[in-house]
Each structure stands twice: as C-alpha cells, then as structure tokens.
Image (cartoon, rainbow, N blue to C red):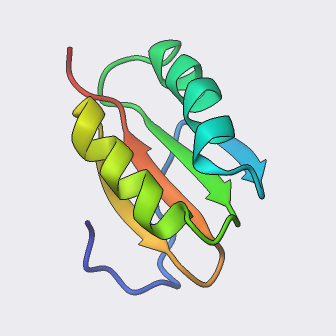
Amino acid sequence: MSECSPDRTHPFDESWDAGDLGCGELVLPLRFKLKAMQPGQIIRVRATDPGAPTDLPAWCRMTGDTLVHHDATQHFYFIRRKAT
C-alpha cells in the first residue's frame, strides 16, 4: 500500500462507486470490472461499507491484484489489475 499522504492525487484509469455494498455484493462486479481492464491499469473504488478496509485488501491478496493506495477519509481504494 502506498505511503503517500491522503491528500495526494493518485492516477487511475477507471472509477466505480460501490457505495455501501458489502463484500459479497462488491467482489463479483469488481472482478468483472478489473477483467475488462488492461493489465497494470488502476481502478479507483469508493466503498463505504464498514468491512471494506479489511475485505478489499484481503480480496487483493487472494486475486493477485494490488491495492496501491487506500484513502480512508474519502473511502477510496486504488487497485491495480494484475499483470496476467
């Protein structure tokens, strides 16, 4: 995860507002969105569910995608699609 300050702008290729979707409702659409992207591209996900700070990093570890930054103030998660 990035050590950058939370007010720094992070580049991204796609954006998705998942709102308050829980892990079970969030991961399937996120999987399809990432599969539609090119390897190395970044999606910015806004997720306000209380479990997201735990669930999204765990999901990234399981899928091989990379959580490059988490902005806890804005509830943004920047996820890089794995290379292959």
Position of residue 22 measured from the top left corner of the image (x, y, whole percent): 67, 51
Which is nearer the eye, 44 or 22? 22
Image position of 9 with respect to 64: above or below: below
- 24 or 2: nearer the eye? 24
Q: Quadrant of residue 41?
A: top left
Residue 8 in the image, given as x and y percentages of width and height: 47, 78
Q: Quadrant of the C terminus?
A: top left
In the image: residue 17, left or right of residue 60: right
31 relative to 1 in the view: left or right: right
Look at 66% across and 42% down and name the residue there: 15
Does residue 35 appear to the left or right of 69 in the view shown? right
Could you tell me which residue is drawn at 32 percent across and 52 percent down? 58
Residue, x 53% and y 36% (percent of image)? 13
Above or below: residue 43 compared with residue 81: below
Question: Number of labelled discs?
Answer: 0
Position in image of residue 1 (x %, y %): 26, 66
Residue at horizontal 75 percent and vertical 49 percent from the top? 17
* 37 versus 61 height, above or below: above
Q: Is residue 46 above or below residue 39?
A: below
Residue 43, position as x, y percentages in the image: 52, 40
